[in-house]
Image (spheres, grey):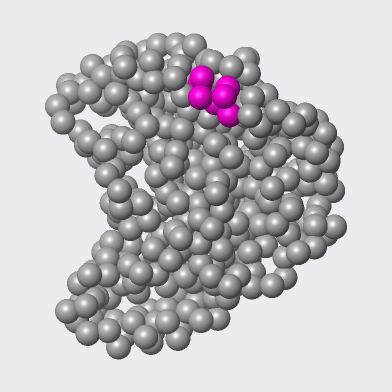
Amino acid sequence: MDLLDVGAADLGRRLGGGESTVEDHIERVLERIGRRDPGLNAFSQLNPGALSRARELDATPAREREALPLFGVPVAVKEEIEVAGLVTTLGGRGNTIPAAVDSEVVARLRAAGAIIIGKTNMPEFGQVPFTEGEWGATHNPCDPARSPGGSSGGSAVAVASGMVPLALGGDAGGSIRIPAAWSGVFGIKPSRGRVSTAPHPNLWHKLGTYGPLARSVEDLRLAMAVTAPEDPGPGLDGALRVGWSLESCLPGVKPDPQLARAVARAADRLAEEGHEVTRGSIRWAETPLTFMVQFHLGVLDEVRRLERPERIEKRSKRIAAMARMLPPGALRWAERSTTRVERAMERIFRRIDVLLTPVTPMLPPPIQLVHRMGYLAVQRVSAKVVAYTSYWNLAGHPALSVPVGISSEGLPLAVQVIGRRGEDDLVLEVGERLTRY
């Protein structure tokens, strides 16, 4: 198989073994991006230092390459994550000065031999589950007239279209899992606190985390080992107690029949392996305000970090204005409420080991310019899309989007695998088993 089409783990091994120089490979990657990205708009900027970094890696002695699991692997990074030498745009026009240092997660990727090939598009501040804004829109490689989801849509498309084998995204309400599902790739929201958000203390307070997107579980596992080397929790050992549900935390939201059948089939497959599988209901704790307070204040935090906050989009100005009107104790209340959600879900996961649900209730919709809608219209559209994902940001549990087939329209089908906090590796193992069929 052409090196351009292999996964990150395999590519690191083959480049480390000298099958190609890193410089030649990165030149080919940039050529492919030049051919494919104009019709998809995944990348917001490319890294002018990628080739010089490739030449540095080519000079690395063979014995040292063995310690670099991502040797020469091109990685795309979402616009909200700092990459030294590149502007952190957060999907807007409020910053113009390149970042002085890498975020911790990017520094860990570089230390493992990765080459940051560029940064990927996102809606401003990641505030909607689509990838569009005043800069334009990112297109789904499965059907360019449709949305790839968001807010890590650029990262998902870069992986799904074969421009890179691995990308970083951020997820504070479903922003890794939704574009992974709609673009047909794997994406994991790690357990709360597992992946560092430094230099920032958090991503939208208790809601967000960074995480990888890739075309295989093997590559997600490698990316997690590099970016979050702490204990990934226990793996699969014996029969599991598997729950599955089609209920969402938003009343009245039901999944597309094809997505519902995909979840049921995934449950059946695990039952055939000998696991104890039960369909059930979830008693949702707290109210949407718990999420919305942290969302609004999280956007306001990012607005305050901009060089030119007056240049943000109209929709962002509305959200920042609403955040400023919240009472002083709102964040403290929301974080206490989040703790109650954590405890409620811990009780549920005493009875099950993993939970299967849809990722979203719908197949990828046609692209729409959401940034031109009014505030209430945007919230109505977004709330339905995140109905199966956002609650697990409150709970802090690891959640994985797994591609499990193709719809009658030729669009990706996906299942969400959720585990206990700290048991990220078990979630990955279950996801890997679902891909064997």
Q: Position of residue 144 (x, y in %)?
A: 61, 53
Is residue 244 visible in the rendered structure shown here? no
Please report the residue visible at 16 percent of the width from the left and 31 percent of the height from the top.
237
Q: Quadrant of residue 25?
A: bottom left
Q: Is residue 333 left or right of residue 224?
A: right
Q: How many marks?
A: 0
Name which residue lies at 49% across and 76% down. Answer: 30
Q: Which residues are magenta?
A: 335-341
Which of the 4 image quarters holds residue 22?
Answer: bottom left
Q: Is residue 336 magenta?
A: yes
Question: Which residue occupies 55% across, 81% down?
Answer: 48
Q: Residue furthest front?
A: 328
User: At 77% across and 29% down in the image, what residue appears?
Assistant: 327
Q: Is residue 8 left or right of residue 390?
A: left
Q: Is residue 261 above or below residue 302?
A: above
Q: Decide whether residue 145 is among the magenta residues.
A: no
Query: How far across and how far down the image is residue 345, in percent?
Result: 43, 20
